Image: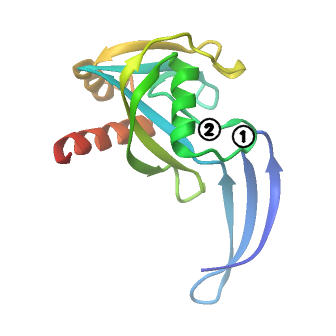
Amino acid sequence: MEALDSTQVYANAWMTVREDAIRRHDGSPGIYGVVDKPDYALVIPLDGERLMLVEQYRYPLGARRWEFPQGTAPDRAELDAATLAARELREETGLAAGRMTHIGTLDVAPGMSSQRGNVFLATELVEGPAERELEEQDMRAAWVPRAEFEAMIRDGRVTDAQSIAAYTQLLLHEHHG
């Protein structure tokens, strides 16, 4: 596939949307709508058999959701993945990690978005005050036993695809070291 032209059709502090004119392999024309967002970091805070989750209102869904701490830098800035992970962990939970291990990469929605995520395991945790952004003021954080987290996935209390995929990466990391 060949990109012929690209037009930005929308932008805000978190994303841009563009429409690309393309030529398919067979020569026929087409278009792609693409949401461009900076890469995000997702952090799995692990203390023994406990995981730290955050719950917040997700406006597009119109509902509160439990998930692992995750996010991007303000104003579509690109930050080093480990720096961003430490920042998101501190902002959303108040935790600082003595050890941060990169365990995987995720593509959010590769059919429509360029955004990718870096998954980190945070251990040797020290608690402190959260430093939440304005949009996160209603967020709450809680320690959840691993068995309960798995039950939350099974019964639909955790539906965030990135959190579920990241947990799979954690299991593989632990299994294959």
Question: Considering only vertical position in the picture, is 6 above or below 42?
Answer: below
Which numbered disc, 1 or 2, marks the residue that appears first in the sequence?
1
The amino acid at mark 2 is Thr
Question: What residue appears at the point 67 percent right and 53 percent down from the top-left corner?
Answer: 35
Residue indicated by mark 1: 14
Residue 63 image position (x, y, % from top left): 55, 21
- Classify mark 1: residues with Cα within 10 Å, few (<14), some (14-19) or many (20+): some
Question: Considering only vertical position in the picture, is 5 above or below 49?
Answer: below
Question: What residue appears at the point 57 percent right and 37 percent down from the top-left corner?
Answer: 84
Asked whether 87 or 165 is in front, the reply is 87
Question: What residue appears at the point 55 percent right and 10 percent down from the top-left corner?
Answer: 129
- Classify mark 2: residues with Cα within 10 Å, few (<14), some (14-19) or many (20+): many
Residue 111 image position (x, y, % from top left): 54, 59
Q: Are marks 1 and 2 in contact (CB under 8 Å)?
A: yes
The amino acid at mark 1 is Trp
Residue indicated by mark 2: 72
Asked whether 117 or 165 is in front, the reply is 117
* Mark 1–mark 2 distance (CA, rounded to whole Å): 8 Å
